[in-house]
Amino acid sequence: MRTITVLGAGIMGVGIAQVAAAGGYNVILRDLQKRLVDNGISTIEKNLQAMVDCAQFSREQMEEALARIEGTTDLEYSGQADLVIEAVVENMAVKKQIFTQMDSLCPPHTILASNTSTLSITEIAANTHRPDKILGMHFFYPVPKRPLVELVKGLETADETIDITREFCARIGKISVVLNRESPGYLYNRMVLSLINEAIHIYCDNLASREDIDRAICAGLGLPMGPLTLADIIGLDNLHNAMLLYCEEFHDNKYRPHPLFTTMIRAGHLGKKSGQGFYEYK
C-alpha cells in the first residue's frame, strides 16, 4: 500500500491526511472546492510546524510529509489509490453516492473505508461491487493526538481487508480495535456515553460537585478529562441524539438520556460550542 486518498478536507479529513503523510504514505486530499483543499493543506502545514517547534518533528520530516500530500477537486483522480478513506458529512445518502462513484473509479484492489461513527457499513457497501473491501474506519478527534482507530466489519467485509487496514494503522502510529459486526456507538462511544449519562445522574442526585465528579474519573482511571467536561466538548445535543438512537436500537432503558439533557438543550446550553454547558466557556 503506497497511496491513500482522503475524501473531505474538514477537521477529520485533514487530521487523517496529516498522519498518513507523516507515516510515509502518498496522500491525495480531495474536496469539492479548491479553497477547502488549500485551507486543509495549510492547516496540516501549521500543525506540523507546531510539532517542529515542540521538537516532536524535524524540519526535514515536515518538508517530506508536506511533499507527499497532493490536493485536488477531481474525483476521478482521487480514485488512483490503494486505500480511500471517506470523511464527509454524516449523511447516508451522501456516503452511498460517494462509495458508488469510488467503486467505479478505483482499481479492483482498492479498499474503501468510511470514517462514520453511526451509519451502517453493510448498507453503504451494498451499493458497490466490492463489499468485501469496505469497512468502517473510525478515527477520533483530534486525529494526530488520539491513537485509537475502530475498524468495523460490514456483513461481507473480508478478513484480509481488516488485516491490511490494521497494518496501515500500525504504520501511522495508531492502535486499532476490530468490531466483528457493526453496532450503534461501536466500542468507545457506547461505553463513554454510558459513563457520561451516569455522571449526570450522580450530579443531579447532588452526591458531588461537577468538579469532583470529573476529578474522581481523572484520578481514578487516569483519563485526561472527566465525563462532564467531555460532555461539554462533544455537545449535549449530539450526546442526546446518540443516546436516543441507542435506546431505539438496543431497546434498553439504560441508554435513556437523563432529563437534564432536555432542559439544558432547551436553554441553549449545549456545551463548549455555545459557551455554556456544565461549565462556562469564554
Image (spheres, grey):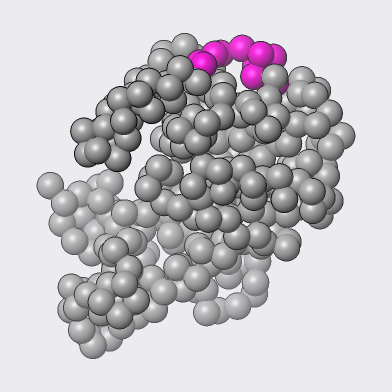
Q: Nearer the viewer, residue 206 or 131?
A: 131
Residue placed at 51% from the left, 42% from the top? 172
Q: Is residue 195 visible?
A: yes
Image spot of residue 109 (x, y percent) = 80, 31
Quarter of the image for the N terminus: give it.
top right
Residue placed at 45% from the left, 17% from the top? 67
Residue placed at 27% from the left, 72% from the top? 218
Please say whether residue 154 is one of the residues in the magenta stretch: no
Residue 190 as seen in the image, left or right of residue 81 = left
Image spot of residue 156 (x, y percent) = 84, 51
Q: Nearer the viewer, residue 58 or 222?
A: 58
Which residues are drawn in magenta? 70-79
**Relative vertical location of residue 16 with respect to residue 236 in this rendering, above or below:** above
Q: Nearer the viewer, residue 245 or 76?
A: 76
Residue placed at 30% from the left, 80% from the top? 220
Q: Is residue 203 visible?
A: no
